[in-house]
Amino acid sequence: MPLEHLPLEPTYLPYLTSTHIVPLQVIQALLPLLRSTPTRARDALSNGTGKQSIIVCLPVTDTRVGLPFAGAQAMSASATLQGLQVLRREIKIASLSMINPEAMKNIRVVTVEVGTIDTDGHNQHHRQAPSGSVDVQTFMEDWSASEKSVYGQSFLTVNGGNVQVGKSRKPTPVSRFVKTIVNIVNGQSYGNGSNTPLLVGALYKFRSWLRGDRISVGAGGELLMICDPRSGPR
């Protein structure tokens, strides 16, 4: 719905709580458990178990673009992304401390910005009506006459379900998304695992250093990250 019409207390605040505040509460609860004692840090290093990863998946269109009539999603995703950026920098600074630096060196925060994924074998390339099976016209019933006049036609175009602007991207198979997450958990590169050529693996490591453990998976995600001027050192 238009940002002008978005009910902040009855609609946006519950959405913000479930999609932004609750995930942050989970991360706050996990951090003390992931923090290493000097003994655990030495054991992890000697056993080659790699770092403990906090992985957060966010929709790339909301974090990078912010689509029309999807203000609640974009604001929540952007706020979560910025919080993860701050957390990542705090962990990095803490790991450089002269007092117990090992406690945080074993933690990394990975943001996976997700593009279009083919989750059901016949992914739809258009945006669906905001209320699932609810007709778009019905969704607009409580809008004021002025809002319908100003936003109505554009809202129908974006959410009508039968209008497609430009050429659709082929959705990425869900198996690639799963493989990416498994590689992160296993401490591997963001490439194709152990079979990744040396040069490609080096490029993935450089990309990780440049972007600060921000990666993308899914159709359109990589392009948005390349084109976004904010894609710099984190």
Image: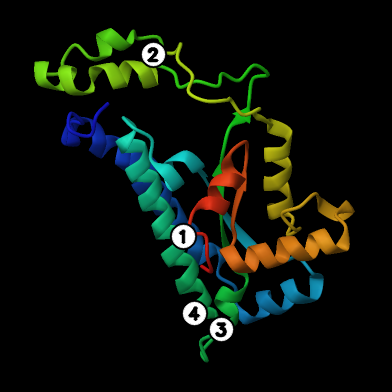
Identify the disc placed on residue 160: 2
Q: Earlier in the sequence, mark 4 or mark 1?
A: 4
Q: Quadrant of residue 119?
A: top right
> Distance between the Cα atoms at labels 3 and 2?
54 Å
Under tag 3, what secondary structure?
Answer: loop
Within 10 Å of disc 4 (Cα), the crowding (few <14, some 14-19, many 20+) is some
Q: Earlier in the sequence, mark 4 or mark 2?
A: 4
Left or right, 17 with reference to 109: left
- Which residue in the structure is indicated by mark 3? 101
Q: Nearer the viewer, residue 167 or 137?
A: 167
> Distance between the Cα atoms at labels 1 and 3?
29 Å
Under tag 4, what secondary structure?
Answer: helix
Left or right, 185 with reference to 31: right
Q: Quadrant of residue 72?
A: top left
Q: Earlier in the sequence, mark 3 or mark 2?
A: 3
Front label number (4 vs 1): 1
Q: Earlier in the sequence, mark 2 or mark 1?
A: 2
Asked if one can make out residue 7 in the rendered structure from this viewpoint, the answer is yes
- Which residue in the structure is indicated by mark 1? 230
Identify the disc placed on residue 94: 4
Q: Quadrant of residue 136?
A: top left
The amino acid at mark 4 is: Ala
The residue at the far front in this view is 166
Q: Are marks 1 and 3 in contact (CB under 8 Å)?
A: no
